[in-house]
Amino acid sequence: MFDPVRDKSIPLAHEQQVLSYWSAIQPDYQHERHALPRQCDVLIVGAGYTGLNAAITLAQDFQQHSVVIDAGAIGAGCSSRNAGFVLPGTGRLSFQDYQRQFGNDVARAVQNEFAKSVEHVKDQCKNAPTSLHLSSTRYLKLAHKRNLSKKLEQQVSLYQDTLLQAEWLSPNEINAQLPGVKHAYGGIAFTPAMSLNPKAYVNQLARTCDQLGVHLHSQIVMLRYEQGLHDMVVHTNQGIIHARKLLLCTNGYMPFTVAPTLTRKHLPVLSSVLVTEPLSAAQIEQVGFSQHDLIMDTRKLKYYYRLLPDNRLLFGGRGAITGNKAENPKYTEHLLAALKQSLPALQDLNAAFRWQGWISVSLDSMPRVFEHERNVHAAMGYCGAGIAFSSLAGKRIAEQAMEKNLPPLPFYQGSLPNFPLPAFRRLGQWGYYQYGRWVD
């Protein structure tokens, strides 16, 4: 499959390289067709959650004429193939990490911004079709080792003065509620959180864009951009577009040749997902599954899972390191083995669907919304926890481009740091995976 670190260009309709469960049950959105303009107020590259939310904000709040282009279909990247977890968080930093680096007040303000990101998604889903399957849930973070239980429990009190609710569940309570989950030594139940059909959500955003007069263009590839005398000059496979502002909202999917000074600031990482055949009522009861739970563990290389509306089990984790190894069946076999180890009652399950997608990992485990250069803004580095925050980041990047002050939070202040020796990022990733497996 396409590899943004190795491949010089992104293929048209690259989403067709991947058959996910979501694409099997949800058709592509057929957006209104427009001639590609030669000039616009704002050009947005990437028709996913960030890009479409940015376009909506620009139209509703700033009356800007924006154009959104994507090399694939609408939501071709992770916006149409993720797990559907709408979580109050992003990146890989804990509350305590923010406390240590930025102090108590900033740490609490960050959690409040995360809570707002969930509400933002809820607002964008008003009047959405039933296929969205939007449901309020709780996010369960489970200690996978006994020696992590106390440390996790101590985090609960930190959330008292925030918009998030955190409830400690003892090992006995976890066992009573989820008797089929092995290696769960207590956990935190976070709200607000939601689950949804990710492809239906990106379709809903595109529908809103159409209603607002935003021009959406699929199978348009940005080849390069440059600073003109009075505007940005963007070269595409269908000609040149002039724009006053350029928003780069591709997250993990920007080829390294298009914007090398930007792509060295993150590491595209493959996340791997499988979906099983439907579980029986007896299997669901054995495990204690509810469609109102989104579950993730505390591993360095995390596993996450949820019960889908049709009673299939979605289970995800890390995949291959390079795109040319993505389809190797050993990664699905490893994920299926992890599922059965985590849920011993489900030994007979098989993967009915399996797929991968590129997430964007930042060096310091924190995303950014930033001005990359004059009139060029970017949002990236969500580290795989992206539906809620990447949606709010779309609103924030639009506000930043329109020179509105953003909340004084770390991920809105300054650029992503560069990876040192970016040519060796993949070697470092391999080393981290070995370390993570040993620790876990």
Image: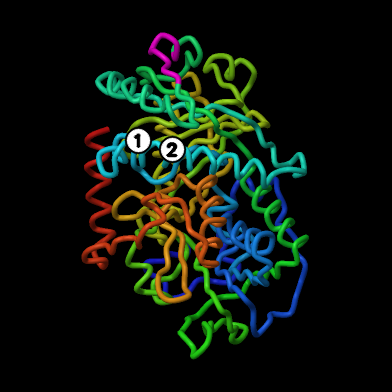
Q: Which portion, as a residue range, is magenta? A: 167-174
Q: Is residue 224 above or below residue 292?
A: below
Is the C-beta separation of discs 1 and 2 under 8 Å? yes
Image quadrant holding the C terminus, namely top left
Residue 344: quarter of image: top left
Q: Is residue 173 magenta?
A: yes
Residue 96, position in %: x, y?
Answer: 30, 34
Q: Write down the residue under mark 2.
A: 111
Residue 122 in the image: above or below residue 430: above
Residue at (49, 25) in percent of width and height: 165
- Image location (x, y in percent) of residue 152: 32, 24
Residue at figure coordinates x 54%, y 50% from the top left: 392
Q: Which residue is mark 1?
A: 95
On screen, residue 54 above or below 233: above
Residue positioned 38% across, 20% down in the render: 184
C-alpha gap between disc 1 and disc 2:
8 Å
Query: What is the quadrant of residue 308 in the picture?
Result: top right
User: Going by the image, does 342 lie left or right of 212?
Assistant: left
Report which quarter residue 326 is drawn in: bottom left
Front residue of this view, candidates 398 and 404: 404
Q: Is residue 16 visible?
A: no
Work out whether mark 1 precedes mark 2 in sequence or the reverse, and give the earlier one.
1
Q: Is residue 129 magenta?
A: no
Q: Secondary structure at mark 2?
A: helix
Q: What amino acid type is highlighted by mark number 2?
A: Gln
